[in-house]
Amino acid sequence: MKRNAYISFVLLFYTLSFQANAQNEIWSLNKCIEYALAQSIDMQKGQISIDESRINTKQAKAQWQPSLSFSTSHSINNSPWAPENKSNNLSAGWTVFNGFKRKYNIKQQELQEEISNVNMEEIEEDVKLAVLSDYIQILYATENLKSTKNSMEVAAAEYSRSKELFEAGAISKSDFSQIEAQYVKEKHLLVMAENDLVEAKLNLKLLLRLDPNTEIEILAPEITNEDILGQLPEKDSIFENAMRARPDIKNAELNEQMSELKIKSAKAGYYPSINLNAGVGTGHNSSSDWALREQMKQNFGENVGLSLNYSILDNRNRKSEVERAKLNQHSSALQTEQIKDNLKKTIESAYNDAIAAQLSYVASYSNEKSAEASYELTKEKYDLGAKNPYEMLNGKNALLNAQQQTLQAKYTALLNIQVLNIYQGLPISIE
């Protein structure tokens, strides 16, 4: 009982220590990616698949080695005249030739090992994309919350000032109600912005397989206009780089090679097989007058043999196997072309999205500055009594909408640019 209590205490201590470290630690994008890759169940399953492929490759190579086996038998018959028999045999066998099937099987297993590694690259890419998306969503939610808080502070100050003016009889009930409604609206927007940030962080914590109650702080780098509006590579250049880097393209090409080996392996069935066998054995029985040692000596024997096997008629099995392998090769070639076509469409779409997001950001940013200048002018006139609350609030809402559109365009462009980098096999970096 004391030992169990001690173990429980140690586990609790390390759990609390981990949570404390997670709370105090600032998570950068690269750290999130590294942690997610280490914790991903799909990555762990992918590693198991790689290990299994390595075992299969070793087993295929071991088929070049001879086999060796030992057998012994001891029989007693329930009969007055039946002897007691015992025999021991040691036998070895080796396949001298089997139509190159071993050779092609080894190559297939080595290819399968490569395919398992490429599959791991695909899983890794999926994890990176998921982390990138959640991380950028947190950056967006954080900046949106900051902007909403600033607007809320202005609304609160305006509400307090208007309330004093209303109580002093300086403004009408109608004017005060409009200011109050705007204040309530912005309080609601603040709650929504806070919830959006909580949800965005929760999604990332679940992806990282952290306790949902763990508090984490995300490193928020400064995103400049240069980061958003940087010149994109040519579309054809992106596609060419993707053709060399994408794991799904590598996988398709490896499967084509696999289908070619399957054809050769199927054709190997038309060759004969040659097997070499050898063995030694001895035994004794109880009805003999010879002593056990003498029997073992006299009954000792060796054998060696070479056998050749060739199937003349096999109910069309070999021919059907070759035909199926050729069909599989054709299917693999078509699959490769389809993957290339889909990649081209995907890059075309991602490239257009990135360009559109950049243009949207430029337009939204310009609109935001215009709305900001307009609102400041209207606010000055409102403070001087030259504008009514309705005009001032319209100007503020226009500014809030413009700020929201700018933020959305900014982080949409950032995400699309990083996605294009991933397609090209380039590292993800938001500094």
Image (spheres, rainbow, N blue to C red):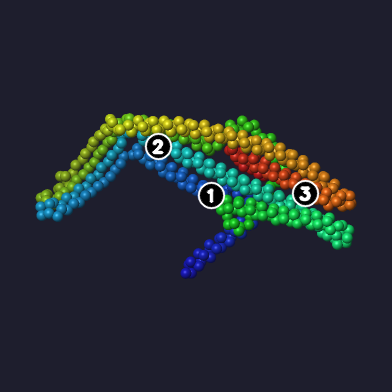
Residue sitting farthest toward the bottom? 1
Under mark 2, the amino acid is Ile
Q: Nearer the viewer, residue 28 or 195?
A: 195
Amino acid beneath label 1: Ser
User: Which residue, given by chain and number where applicable, does mark 3 sit on?
Assistant: 397
The residue that label 1 is drawn on is 40
Task: Answer above or below: position of 348 versus 135.
Answer: above
Farthest residue in the front direction?
A: 174
- For the C terminus, the quadrant is top right
What is the number of callouts on the image? 3
Describe the element under mark 1 as helix, strand or loop: loop
Q: Residue at x 89, y 52 (%)?
A: 385
346 vs 242, nearest the viewer:
346
Which disc, if any, is residue 106?
2
Q: Secondary structure at mark 3?
A: helix
* Residue 164 point in image, percent of width and height: 85, 60
Q: Residue at x 63, y 57 (%)?
A: 215
350 lies above or below 25: above
| Residue at 74%, 56% in the rendered image | 187
